[in-house]
Amino acid sequence: MATIVLAVWDTLRRNRNIAAVVASGLGLVFVSLAFVITGRHLPWSGIEGFAHGFDGVIGFPGSVQKVLVDGNAFNPGRYQALAWVHIAGLTVFAVFAAWWLIGALQSVRETRSDPMAAAPEVAPATPAHHVSVAEQFFGTDDPEIVRNQVDTFLVRHLRVGIREVEFTKVGAGIVLGVLAVDGQRLVVKIHPPGTNTPYLRALQDVQMHLAVQGYPAPKPVLDPQPFGVGVATVESRLPEPPPAPPSDAATRRALAEALAAFVRFGAPLARHAELAGRGPLRPHAAGSVFPPPPGSPFDFAATAAGAEWIEEVGARARTLLDAAPRTAPVVGHFDWRSENIPVAGGRVVAVFDWDSVGAATEAIVVGSATHHFTLDWRSPNPHVPTLDEVRAFVADYEAARGRPFTQAERVAARTAYVFCTAYGARCEHVLASSGQPAPTGFRDRLASAGVALLG
């Protein structure tokens, strides 16, 4: 009773809800009373030399001698039952005491209502914390913790740890270039939740198929594996030389020849089911004829005002492409631009950004490349190709291909160029509508030549 009173007093002092304490405390009292009552019917000899006044409450079952029931008549059955109830009561007491203690400690804090009391001070709302991409994958953006998690992943799957993290790139996912302790240079790609794992495996099939033929494609080292909330892959690291002049004729020729080789080497995998529908004609976004930008929050529907002319040109181009004769699909890279395709010594030395690989007709693959092959967004002045550069790229591609396009293929490639340019213009319009710095290269190209090229 003294313990319960003290607990209730302490609970009130700490401004906590006493209901749980009182309820569990009463239960404890009832168990205690039952324990005492049964004990008083059993004359214990007590603990020798200690607390003789507590005979019948504290003692040992072996010291029980007799029990008087119903007028001092000896009843062994009642004696045995009462003794075991008493012994069991000790266990119940301990359980109830523990439960009561937990109830007292876990009671919910409750604010006392006092109409005369001043309103409590409320701390200003903390602004919502922007969760970075690193925090989504690693639970933190601390570089050392990130490094340790990636190191653990590599040791588990490849039996090799990290000597140094050489670069980190953050987009929709995270790409880390690591130097392993055994000297390997690897690229760890951590893809966001919801990534299509069969598609990643299809990309690795293309990478390996091209790499074994001497093409500058990274070789897969580890197939897709769960990593936190996402999926991770590991591949070999290719060289990344300083950017070559994008408007230089030798750079343009190298890009065109490498794209022709990409299409030629990848031909046997062109009908891979996971590569279909990955080009510029993939399903359109809400309120637009254009597909949503991969990994981008661009909202075409919310920025429709002022973009009607872009949508109109895009709709016409898409209609013409949908109606064009279908030729056999090829494997293409739909982000074929100088930033992703480094050139050194007049040749392409690596191909990056494999998440943009898919299957489409060759004319659409080439038309898509022509609209942005000179672009490098790392440059302070990204260069959108001129029409003369577009025509020269197509001519270089045809030379590398070994035969010219048919008239129908030329029309399809030109239409794909217009559609992709309109897509770039639409993205520029989203940026401008959002008050962000926005380039005008695609909008300028589309306004000056888009409609004329559609014929």
Image: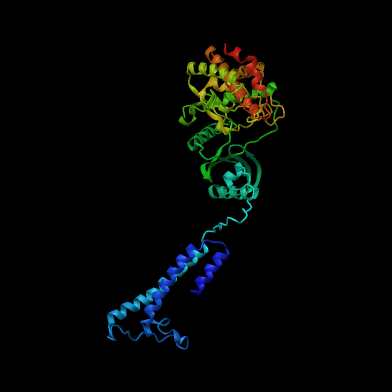
Answer above or below: position of 273 versus 78.
above
Q: Residue furthest right?
A: 380
Please name the colour scheme applied to the rendered image. rainbow
Instruction: Please say if 103 is above or below 394.
Output: below
Q: Looking at the rendering, which quadrant does residue 400 occupy?
A: top right
* Residue lying furthest bottom: 49
Determine which quarter of the picture holds residue 348. top right
Number of marks drawn: 0
- Where residue 315 sits: x, y (%)? 54, 18
x and y percent of residue 329 in the render? 49, 23
Q: Residue furthest top?
A: 455
Q: In this view, does 415 lie above or below 85?
A: above
Q: Which of 406 and 430 is in front in this view?
A: 430
In this rendered view, identify the residue nearer to me: 49 or 244.
49
Residue 417 seen from this side: no
- Residue most toward the front? 116
Identify whether 97 is placed above or below 217. below
Image position of 320 (left or right of 425):
left
Could you tell me residue 352's position as x and y percent? 60, 33
In the image shown, does 397 or 138 lie closer to the viewer?
138
Percent position (x, y) of residue 130?
Answer: 62, 42
**Dividing the image into 4 quarters, which one contains the C terminus?**
top right
Q: In which quarter of the image is residue 413?
A: top right
Q: Which residue is drawn at 61% across and 16% down?
A: 450
Q: Nearer the viewer, residue 212 or 268?
A: 268
- Residue 176 shows up from this direction: yes
